[in-house]
Amino acid sequence: MRETIAASQLSRRRFLQSSAAFLAAIHAWPRNAAVAQDHTRVEPGERPPREDGIVVENPRLRVPVSLIIDDSTCLVNLAHFAIPQFAQIFPDRYTQPWKLLPREIPDAFVEKFAGWCHEQGVKGKYSIVPYPACVGWLDRDLPGWSKQELDASLQLVRDRILPDWDIHPEMVSHTFVVDPRTGRPFPEKSERFMENWRWTDDKSADQIAEYMAFALRILKNVGLPCEGITTPGGFGNRVLPELSRATLHAVRDVFGAEIPHYFRHLFTDERSVAPRVEFAAGLNTDHPRCVVSIIGCTGDWFGGWDGMEVGHADQFITEDGRGGRLPKVIARQEPAILVCHWPGIYWNGYELGFRIFQEVVRRLDAHYNHLQWMKLSDISRYWAARELTAFTWREQGVTLRAPFGTPQFTVRFKQRDASQLVHVAGSEQTVLKPIDNLRRLAPGTFVRDGRDLVACFDLPKGLSRLEGLQSQA
């Protein structure tokens, strides 16, 4: 088979048998190692009082699903260029045969991947590293590729990726720390000056925000809007409160994003993977703010961060739909956010990671009818509204004060009924249509579920109310 030949060509067996190389895979993007140290809880900030008998459900009673793609950029195969740079710092850990890896992940594959995902309704996050492994600046030139090739690659991202995917910087280079004043990597080559390792140790939120803003502005220069960031490797892991605040400030300052978010953690154990709404403040003012931490729920069980491993769909969900990681998360009604790395999806032209992902999507479709693919920004917005909207019971209704609006806001009113339900926002009134099937729930409808009433509507920012709720006898 072609896969067997490819694995042989890339010395995969030698790679996997090498304990030093195995450690390299762990230390390069230490997500699971990072979560083991996740003992510093970031402040949630303000929360509104809760009313009894009101529960905010998932949007349309569906479980959000998303795909996080790390280490992607334009044209550059980050693994090919990053491995020798990591080896400068940890020569015993990075022994992969990186010269055998292709230097480029072609735009033809980006087009193929984006097209298939769009047809399937898949959404998520796609990193664009602004200065990938110090090869070149995406807003200037990319040595090894013509200006026309770079411009075409950026346009492809705008046209085919942006509609379904959030764009994140994964800091500036994903390897050496770059001095924002000079645009050159710092001369010291140690883990203290690597984005993946210790540079953020003891840094303030302002210092981290300055570095994030440097990366964000490069993407702004090439017309790629961002509402969030992805941390490269261990970036920020020892200064989690500062990382959260830095994201809030940098993304708001550069892009004016209302609800910044970031991807730092993934958990594959029994911990909750629900998004964390952090540093919420000003909820009763015209200028509310918060930042959302998005948490992945899987490891990279596709093709690894370097495209030299082969995972299996069963690690995500087995053929019968009962085993694997995803059914456990879906059963808890928490967002099932898969994590992968672009070199492993491409898998050196053999697309093994992509094929595994296609099989995972097929199995999810076969076993579930209550999932909803969402971008990270949409999940973040929903969770901010879910946790920060205040409810106040009033006669035959409820008043909502929402610091942030969101589509598909879904609320369960326990032991309540209604013959007619009306959502009032300012001078606009929307009569919600009664339906008789939970799976048909959509904005502008409500359904009875046992002794409860579940309503779905687009929640506006500010004050609104639902009228027509009645207590059951």
Image (cartoon, helix red, strand yellow):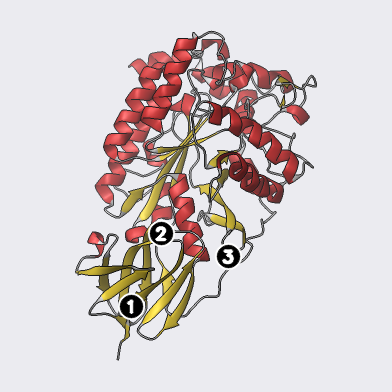
Nearest to viewer (mark 2 / mark 3): 3
Q: Nearer the viewer, residue 221 or 472?
A: 221
Where does label 2 land, which residue? 333
Disc number for residue 25: none
Residue sitting at x 48%, y 58%:
383
Compare marks 3 and 1 and give the one earlier in the sequence: 3
Residue positioned 69% across, 34% down in the render: 211
**457 with respect to 12 (left or right):** left
- At numbered mark 1, what does the secondary structure look like: helix, strand or loop? strand
Q: Position of residue 274 (x, y in %)?
A: 50, 56
> What type is the residue that disc 2 sits on?
Gln
Outermost front residue:
427
Tell me the CA gap for discs 3 and 1: 24 Å
Q: Residues within 10 Å of mark 1 (few under 14, many from 20)?
A: some
Tell me the tag on residue 467: 1
Look at the picture and state if 125 lies above or below 332: above
**Element class at badge 2:** loop
Residue at (41, 28) in percent of width and height: 158
Distance between the alpha carbons at the discs numbered 2 and 1: 28 Å
Earlier in the chain: of badge 2 and badge 3, it is 3
| Residue closer to the observer: 62 or 161 | 161
Q: Do residues under tags 2 and 3 come within 8 Å of each other at their CB atoms? A: no
Mark before the other along the chain sequence, 2 or 1: 2
Q: Amino acid at mark 3?
A: Leu
Circle 3 is placed at which residue position?
283
Q: Is disc 2 surrounded by few (<14), some (14 to 19) or many (20+) residues within 10 Å?
A: some
Q: Tell me which residue sits at (40%, 43%) in the image.
A: 316
Is any atom of residue 462 visible in this view? yes
